[in-house]
């Protein structure tokens, strides 16, 4: 299967979790875009959806899915999102699309988080994909020094401003053998808005598309 075919397959598998009338959280990225297309194709009727980015909000509008404000929905039935890397224990690295903060908020507000990926993203230990960290702009260099002291190699993602008006540092050369502890440590650095480690609240279900089909890890 091509990468696009895998995205399509895993998006279709995610439809199996949806019931009509649900309020969904919907993440960001090309795999999620395939999921939104599948929702549209199958004419699934939702009560509405909370989006994790402006880019996804545009696609929801085009698919005629009502966009809701998280402040008015209460807990969400289900959150569907992709990831940049995942372990079989369902810890994730996210934020390749710079939407990590809103993604983490929507995940936290959801009763169930179904993550959809292809098998190229499944790893034994997180860290091959550089870990995105969203930072208040004036704290960029200070936070970079702190991340260096933790053993990473932070690189400023130039030209990118998040939907929240912040910047991203991508931290290379990490081997995240204890992602829960590392997530807590980075959260404590002053100036960090959000770290793209989803380990304290990982996915509840991980759907992995490969040539053999879609595997469900839970
Ligand atoms: C955006 C994300 C995405 O979920 C992640 O980058 C995966 O994207 P794609 O499905 O395009 O590979 O975290 O911030």
Image: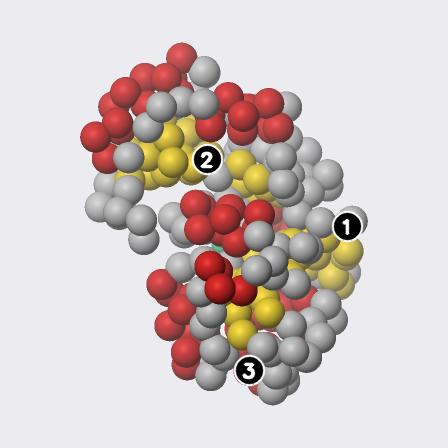
* 142 or 68: nearer the viewer: 68
Q: Position of residue 200 (x, y in %)?
A: 62, 35
Q: Position of residue 158 (x, y in %)?
A: 24, 41
| Marker disc for residue 77 | none
Q: CA distance from mark 1 to mark 3?
A: 26 Å
Q: Is residue 94 above or below residue 1?
A: above
Q: In the image, 188: left or right of 160?
A: right
Q: Quadrant of the N terminus?
A: bottom right
Which of discs 2 and 1 lies nearer the camera? The answer is: 2
| Marker disc for residue 217 | 1
Q: Position of residue 6 (x, y in %)?
A: 62, 64
Q: In the image, 198: left or right of 101?
A: right
Mark 2 in CB contact with mark 1 (< 8 angstroms): no
Element at label 2: strand
**Tag 3 residue:** 40
The residue most toward the top is: 149
Q: Earlier in the sequence, mark 2 or mark 1?
A: 2
* 51 or 3: nearer the viewer: 51
Measuring 37% from the left and 17% from the top, which residue is drawn there? 146
Mark 2 in CB contact with mark 3 (< 8 angstroms): no
Mark 1 in CB contact with mark 3 (< 8 angstroms): no
Distance from mark 3 CB to nearest ligand 1 atom below 8 Å: no
| Marker disc for residue 195 | 2
Residue 91 in view, yes or no = yes
Q: CA distance from mark 2 to mark 3?
A: 32 Å
Q: Earlier in the sequence, mark 2 or mark 3?
A: 3
């Amino acid at each position: 299967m091509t990468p696009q075919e895998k995205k399509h397959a895993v998006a279709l598998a995610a439809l199996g979790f949806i019931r009509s009338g649900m309020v969904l959280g919907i993440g960001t990225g090309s795999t999620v875009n395939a999921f939104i297309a599948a929702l549209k194709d199958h004419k699934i009727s939702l009560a509405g959806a909370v989006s994790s980015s402006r880019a996804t909000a545009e696609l929801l509008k085009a698919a005629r899915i009502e966009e809701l404000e998280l402040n008015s929905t209460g807990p969400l039935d289900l959150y569907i999102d992709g990831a940049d890397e995942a372990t079989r224990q369902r810890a994730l690295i996210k934020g390749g699309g710079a939407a990590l903060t809103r993604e983490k908020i929507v995940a936290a507000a959801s009763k169930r988080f179904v993550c959809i990926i292809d098998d190229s993203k499944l790893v034994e230990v997180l860290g091959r994909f550089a870990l995105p960290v969203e930072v208040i702009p004036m704290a960029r260099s200070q936070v970079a020094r702190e991340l260096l002291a933790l053993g990473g190699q932070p690189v400023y993602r130039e030209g990118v401003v998040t939907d929240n008006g912040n910047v991203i540092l991508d931290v290379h050369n990490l081997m995240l053998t204890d992602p829960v502890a590392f997530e807590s440590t980075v959260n404590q650095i002053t100036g960090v808005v959000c770290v793209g480690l989803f380990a304290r609240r990982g996915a509840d279900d991980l759907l992995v598309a490969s040539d053999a089909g879609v595997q469900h890890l839970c």
